Amino acid sequence: MSSEPWGRVDETGTVYVRTADGEQVVGSWQAGSPEEALAYFERKYEGLVVEIGLLERRVRTTDLSAKDATAAIEHIRRQVDEHHVVGDLEALRKRLDKLAGDVEARREERRAAKAVQADEARRAKEALVAEAEELAASEQWRAAGERLRALVDTWKGLPRLDRRTDDELWHRFSHARSAFSKRRKAHFAALDAQRETARQTKEKLVAEAESLSDSTDWGPTAARYRELMAEWKAAGRAQREAEDDLWNRFRGAQDVFFQARSAVFAERDAEQRENLTRKEELVAEAEKLLPISDLKAARAAFRSVNERWEAIGHVPRDARPRIEGRLHAVERAIQEAEEAEWRRTNPEARARAQGLTGQLQDAVDKLRGQIDAARAAGNNAKADKLAKELEGRQALLDQALKGLEEFGG
């Protein structure tokens, strides 16, 4: 009989391995010497050693899942427990126990990392929902629509949460987008309706203007053309293509009439030159109103100038654009002053400007808080991303504050 530190072979060829619980039968060997038998089963032991070493390396250096690693450990453990090898089986068990502990620790680390990732994704989606709900009330149709589309792309890039939370947040997000889309659709539908009404009104004005174009009743027809022009301005704008076409027809009809009248009144050139002189004096009087310092006085003075202007009559055709352009420049300056005064004193516009400024200030403050929280958590990538968003919000806030200054504070 021959013996070794971890095994022996008895006279019948039975091979034993020594363990803490005593000898265990490994197998039977009849084909050679006891030394060959022990060498064979020792090689099988070395095979398990190599297999454990490879598994340890995979666990340490690859992304082998905890489930697959545990299955591999149990597979080797069964071979060890079956003790069909000769060697230090307890050492193998200790290595397997340690490896199992490492796998479990790694499982816990991944579980914790997944929980952190889920929490970050939840907070990111909550932020997207909050912004979408804020945008749902916006009347900046183009900018808000583009931002909502960008939020959808951001949402798609975030990991899914648990089904209930993800569905609830998506429902709020989708509802905000739908609410904005409905409001935008209603707005443009109303705008289209207004433009269609304007088109129909201007079609009638054009028809009348064209019917008057060959009139020789100079005074009443010219007066009616002035009335038609006032009605045209009051009608509002039609769709762009229709507006341009209708205006060309309307203006063309007036031109036909006034050109005919000019031909008839050719003998009145001297009178028209005198009219030009008088209108140049009126324009000079009107231009003295600039810059506008007293709107009420300027409006009254301009009204007086305009009334006298209308009473004078026509000037030579080639001088009309220049002289009328100078008067219109004064008129535009007064209109701009009136609009500025209206904006400054309009409570509703002031309230809207203050409300928008407050919303933007809240958004800026919120983003700053999120940036501080992200930096405190060591999430510089998120903080940098939020900082870029803050730049855009701050720019909008600065614009809103500048606009609010127009209302006097």
Image: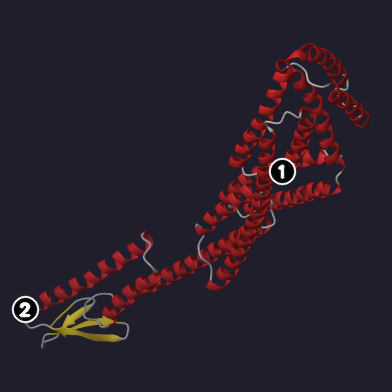
Q: Quadrant of the N terminus?
A: bottom left
Residue 120 spot, x, y in % from top left: 57, 60
The residue that mark 2 highlights is 32
Give the total of numbered labels: 2
Q: Is residue 91 visible?
A: no
Question: Residue 58 is drawn in which quadrant?
Answer: bottom left
Q: Is residue 192 left or right of residue 305?
A: left
Q: What residue is rendered at 36% in x and 59% in y? A: 61
Q: Is residue 194 above or below residue 210?
A: below
Q: Of the residues shown, which amino acid type is indicated by label 2?
A: Gly
Q: In the image shown, does 4 or 244 lie closer to the viewer?
A: 244
**Residue 236 has which mark?**
1
Residue 157 spot, x, y in % from top left: 50, 57
Separation (CA) of disc 1 from disc 2: 111 Å
Q: What residue is rendered at 25% in x and 71% in y? A: 48
Q: Of the residues shown, which amino acid type is indicated by label 1?
A: Gly
Q: Quick one: label 1, few (<14), some, or many (20+) residues within 10 Å?
A: some
Give the SS element for disc 1.
loop
State which mark lies toward you, 1 or 2: 1
Question: Residue 173 is drawn in which quadrant?
Answer: bottom right
Q: In the image shown, does 276 or 262 lie closer to the viewer?
A: 262
Q: How is the structure coloured here? A: secondary structure
Tell which circle, 1 or 2, labels the residue nearer the N-terminal end: 2
Q: Is residue 28 above or below residue 101?
A: below
Q: Is residue 288 above or below residue 409?
A: above
Q: Is residue 312 left or right of residue 209?
A: right
Q: Is residue 70 left or right of residue 184?
A: left
Give the SS element for disc 2.
loop
Residue 293 spot, x, y in % from top left: 90, 27
Residue positioned most to the left: 31
Residue 116 spot, x, y in % from top left: 55, 63
Q: Quadrant of the C terminus?
A: top right
